[in-house]
Image (cartoon, helix red, strand yellow):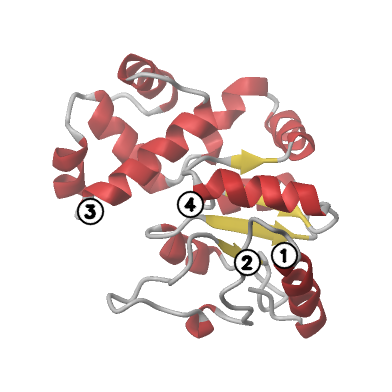
Amino acid sequence: MDDHPVARRGLHSMLSALPSVEVVAAVAAPVQLPRTADGHVDADVVLMDLYLDGERPALGAIETIATHRPVLVVSASREPADVLAAMQSGASGYLTKHADDEDYAEAIAALGEGKFHLSAHLADVVHMATGRGVESRSEVLSPREREALAYVARGFTHQQTATRMGVSTATVNTYISRIRAKLGLGNKAELALAALRHLPQR
């Protein structure tokens, strides 16, 4: 998804040439995305430019789509603030537009498996900007991911967490998968420790 026709056609051409990728739509705005009967985006992964209107980052669109589908932001911007804002809005990955074909294939495959993808040079930029190295990873959690982390770390099941958050269990599963990938976590004990380190204590 990109509001520039030339960029949209170029991305469509490049992605269509990847053997592991099937492009289902190339559109300029979220309202043009194909939808399922329940209103969700009909695609396994959504690629979108961060600045759809050229002025402000489309954080609201990211947040809405990311509730049900993984979003890979593709942007010319390498600004740490933009990367963090996209991640905090629920994006599961971020690529700069200079990325090559292999980078796209790797990122799309990762998101399709429920993983998080941020190219190494962007991760270094973000960490240096926040000035706290690895601890800065917690800043890429979206508010809903932080909320899910708090519930699960307190012992609630994914189903109980879903009920309290007003979402489906599958959505909570997605949140937890993103949290594990973003913070480099393994089991539930590590989730609990992460909550103690990264969430405000009441």
Callout 1: SS: helix
Give whichever of 142, 13 is nearer the camera: 13
Callout 4: SS: loop
CA gap, disc 1 to disc 2?
A: 13 Å
Which residue lies under the disc numbered 4?
90
> Answer yes or no: do the residues labelled 1 and 4 have beta carbons within 8 Å?
no
- Relative to residue 162, is residue 202 depicted above or below? above
Name the front one of labels 2 and 4. Answer: 2
> Answer yes or no: do the residues labelled 2 and 4 have beta carbons within 8 Å?
no
Q: In the rendered image, is residue 192 in sight? A: yes
Q: Tell me where residue 175 appears, x and y as whole percent.
A: 38, 43
Q: Quadrant of residue 55?
A: bottom right
CA gap, disc 2 to disc 3?
A: 24 Å
Residue occupying image coordinates x 62% and y 41%:
117
> Answer yes or no: do the residues labelled 1 and 2 have beta carbons within 8 Å?
no
Tell me the tag on residue 15.
1
Quadrant of the frame with the N terminus? bottom right
Name the front one of labels 1 and 4. Answer: 1
Marked residue nearer the N-terminal end (1 or 2): 1
- Relative to residue 97, is residue 24 depicted above or below? below
At label 4, counting other C-alpha atoms closer than 10 Å, the crowd grade (few under 14, some 14-19, many 20 or more) is: many
Marked residue nearer the N-terminal end (2 or 4): 2
Tell me the tag on residue 168.
3
CA gap, disc 2 to disc 4?
A: 13 Å
Quadrant of the frame with the C terminus? top left
Which residue lies under the disc numbered 2?
48
> Answer yes or no: do the residues labelled 3 and 4 have beta carbons within 8 Å?
no
At label 2, counting other C-alpha atoms closer than 10 Å, the crowd grade (few under 14, some 14-19, many 20 or more) is: many
Marked residue nearer the N-terminal end (3 or 1): 1
At label 3, counting other C-alpha atoms closer than 10 Å, the crowd grade (few under 14, some 14-19, many 20 or more) is: some
Callout 3: SS: loop
